[in-house]
Image: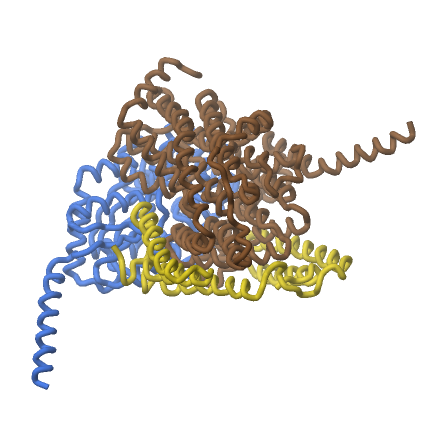
Amino acid sequence: MFTPDLFMQGLQLVFDPFVLLVVICSGLYGLFIGAMPGLTATMAVALLVPITFYMEPVPAIASIITMSAMAIFAGDLPGTLLHIPGTPSSAAYCDDSYAISKKGNASLVLGIDLMLSAMGGLFGSLVLMCAAPALAEVALQFSSYEFFWLAVLGLSCAVLISGRSVLKGLISLLIGLLLTCVGADITLGFPRFTFGSMELLEGFSFIPAMIGMFGLAEVFKNVSAKQTEDAEMITYSTRILKGVGGVIRKFKFQLLRSQIIGTLVGVLPGAGGDIAAWICYGVGKRFSKHPEEYGKGSVEAIANCTTANNAAISGAFIPALVFGIPGDSLTAIIIGVLFMKGLEPGPSLFAQHGDFLYAIYVVFLLANILLIPLGYIVIRCATKVLRVPPAILNPVILGFCMVGAYAINNGAFDIASMLGFGVAAYFMIAHGIPVAPAVLGLVLGHMLENTFMQSMVKSEWDPFSFFSRPIAASLGVITIFLWFMPLIVKGIKRMRGKAAPAA
Amino acid sequence: MRFHDFLLGLLIMAASAAIYFTALGFPDQNDGKPGAWLFPCALSILFGICGLCLAVKGLMHFKEQKLISLIPGLTLPGALRIAATVALVVFYILASDSLGFLITMCIVIFLMMVMMRNKLWVSVVAAPISTVAIYLIFAKLLLVPLPEGLLSF
Amino acid sequence: MKKLTALCAAIAAAAAIAAAPAYAKYPDHAITLICPWGAGGGSDAQVRFIAGLMEKDLGQPVKVVNKTGGGGAVGWSAIARSKPDGYTMGQLTAELAMDHWITPAVTVSYKDFDPLCLMNEDPATVTISANAPYKTYDEFVSYLKANPGKVRGGATSVGGIWHVAMGMWLKAIGLPVTAITYIPTSGSAEAYKEMAAGGIDSCFTSVPESSTMYKSGKAIGLAVMSDKRDPKFPDIPTMKELGHDIQVGTWRGLGLPKGVPADRRDVLVKAIKKAMDDPAYKKFMEDRGFGIKVLEGKDFEAYMAKSDAELGATLKDLGLAK
């Protein structure tokens, strides 16, 4: 698979002063976008496209790749410091990051985010280099049945992320899922629960919901706190990388597992960094030695998820490059740009434009290595935010929340929906109902319903069709096994307990 | 305001019933197979069951909570400040189109800074600076078309 | 009193002088172009490109604003409601001729706009999976006749443009709309993902959306629903050649809210046409595989009226129009 010759040609294409300049600029731009709540990597790339049109293919693609890798890392910054995930990929472990920050160790979290994001991205890039065609073939075997099981597997994590009361976790998950029922349904286009409003036809946008449930709810909490305590002041040290090495050594096998899961989820067209992070969170907790820490500030959880969502980025390029099938809206734009450059993704790219392909690989490696110094600078700047007293910071955060929600559709409706989600989240928290499962429901709700209905229409309502294909059947069995594992483990323990006194 | 788990369970059951009966009115697919109603109905039934469990659990531990209590740690001024924050967001939604981003956001941030007991001169200085900063970042650097209204640059 | 009148007159005169050059020199500030689709898609790419070229001609910025939601309806309502002073225009696409038939909440239609210019038309195709037991157009049609409902088709959500194209095609070849079981997907990307995984046997998307599937050999194009063959795939016959004169596809153009003064409209039409003559624009459209089709003013309006009636009738056949 790996051709050193082409690799050298790729290196030559990338190590050109102009390309390097473009990579650094777009890296900084990506870091900035990712750190702004409400602005997604997709939107940032779309704005870049008119500029890239005037560039050569290598710098054009390089700028997009660098930007997306940086943006996913930078999404962790506001999540850790302000409890507002910058991108949906950071939502899964936002609670943990913020909890540790409040305990005074934001620098450790950010250090882990930085180093493990880069490691995850590098791992994904290596997989992309070595196994792209083979993995793409597997990914293309995923039809609605397989995606249905993937959604169910993701939703099972809700039980794991619900904290003290599983019942309240389920209630929260169902709130999230019910909210995704709003809007035109997939089988008929029938407007459900829209109350005659045009804005609701496509349902609630996820990003305003996320900003409301995390960010605005946090603002409510801060404004209502007694002025004297200033409990939300976060302290930090400037030694960001202290202790990170220890964390990596301690969890090395888990991290490898998360990177593999992250890359594989990324390869599947339509599932990206956000779903990868949720699944790694759930899997990490299930097999963790300290599952009770998850949700309350678990370093392990952060490390696992932050590395997985970066690994997923490289994964998403695999079906896009090999078959020209976009995995998400970001790779769809990249396919469009490749087209404009006369480089059609697909087998011909591999056969005829090997040097360009290797240039893409080199850019992936370079972007993830560059992430470390650039990210370090940005962390140093970002922590300055915390020196601003809360009485000034909170009004400004409110402003960012409103503008971030607005930017999704450029309409005031999304500010209103953010407000609604924020108020709802505040009351949920007051009643001991965790917010994270509802966010998970919002992420996976459409995928669950759409793939279920598609599968049913395809198979003429044969429920066994979900087990009729090899990959679907294995995913289904794994999911059901994970559900009943606690029961099985309990059963074995009880049997041993009974057996012991008899012996 | 915080409800007892028993009351909360009842509320969830009521909500699920409302969703269920609304969703029953959604159409079938054209060939008569289950259509738009299937998911909302199924989810609302699950939601109702969860509500029932919560209500029963609440009854079993009835004496541990008050029927309706205040949110722990929330004082009256605190509640008023939350209400004021909500009101400011509503004000922004209603006014930003006609007044424009710069004026409306400046008012919102200023009032909230005053509410959070900053010194008046601090608010007077910090509100316009932060508004312009947000404007430059989003409107100029990231090309988000914020409403211009009366004032723009 | 006299003095006051004189003063008033002077002010009015001054105001008139101040205002006159502003009228003579349209445009004198930035023009907003509302795109009802999200940043990054094909529709957005087209308007952003044309906006960049129009700026050069008009000497004023043309700012693209993505106002999305409601299947395009949120953006179109915003255009239709905007002040008819020539400083707001918007993109009109095929969904404008469809949404109002399907959803009662959507009232906006092509009648709410003054057309400027049609810019692009991408015809639908008849595309089958390379793994299907049938390989040619005739084999596919006879298979459909022999096995009603066995073939699974997809491309968009229910009531999307390619679903309608499928309905029109089936009607033209004399089959009921139930001859193909339609699997709703979120868009052509998801449909081709399903096709590659074996979940969908046939697709009706446009040529640019299908071309990577053709090139990677995972799908076969059987026909183009147009009267002209696609220059990039000259081997695929048109429906007209196959004996059924159906032309359906997605289209994109620009329009104004009703009531913009005619002289300003002419300025814009001239700028658009000049932009479309630019070689950079032609190269962009060709590279992305978008088909160029230009119709001005009244012709564009007639085109939209025809599209609206045809799509509405097919949506009724599919049991989707209210």
The residue sitting at the bottom extreme is: C1
Q: Colour of chain A?
A: brown
Quarter of the image that includes the C terminus of chain A = top right
Q: How far from the left and from the top, in percent, is residue A90? A: 50, 41
Q: Colour of chain B?
A: yellow
- In-front residue for pair A279/B23: A279
Mark yes or no: residue C131 visible.
no
* Left/right of residue A245 with respect to residue A329 in the rendered view: right
* Left/right of residue C206 with respect to residue A498 in the rendered view: left
Query: In the rendered image of this protein, does residue C153 appear above or below residue B126?
Result: above
In terms of image quadrants, where is residue C267?
A: bottom left
| Colour mapping | by chain
Query: In the rendered image of this protein, does residue A467 appear above or below residue B118?
Result: above
Query: In the rendered image of this protein, does residue C218 appear above or below residue B125?
Result: above
Quarter of the image that includes the N terminus of chain A = top left
The residue sitting at the right extreme is: A502
Q: Residue at x 36, y 65 (%)?
A: B95
- In-front residue for pair C199/C39: C39
Q: Residue at x 31, y 32 (%)?
A: A339
- In-front residue for pair B133/A140: B133
* Left/right of residue A21 with respect to residue A467 in the rendered view: left
Q: How far from the left and from the top, in percent, is residue A140? A: 49, 31
Number of callouts: 0
Q: Colour of chain C?
A: blue
Q: How far from the left and from the top, in percent, is residue A197? A: 44, 61
In terms of image quadrants, where is residue A372?
A: top left
Q: How far from the left and from the top, in percent, is residue A97? A: 54, 41
Mark yes or no: residue B137 visible.
yes
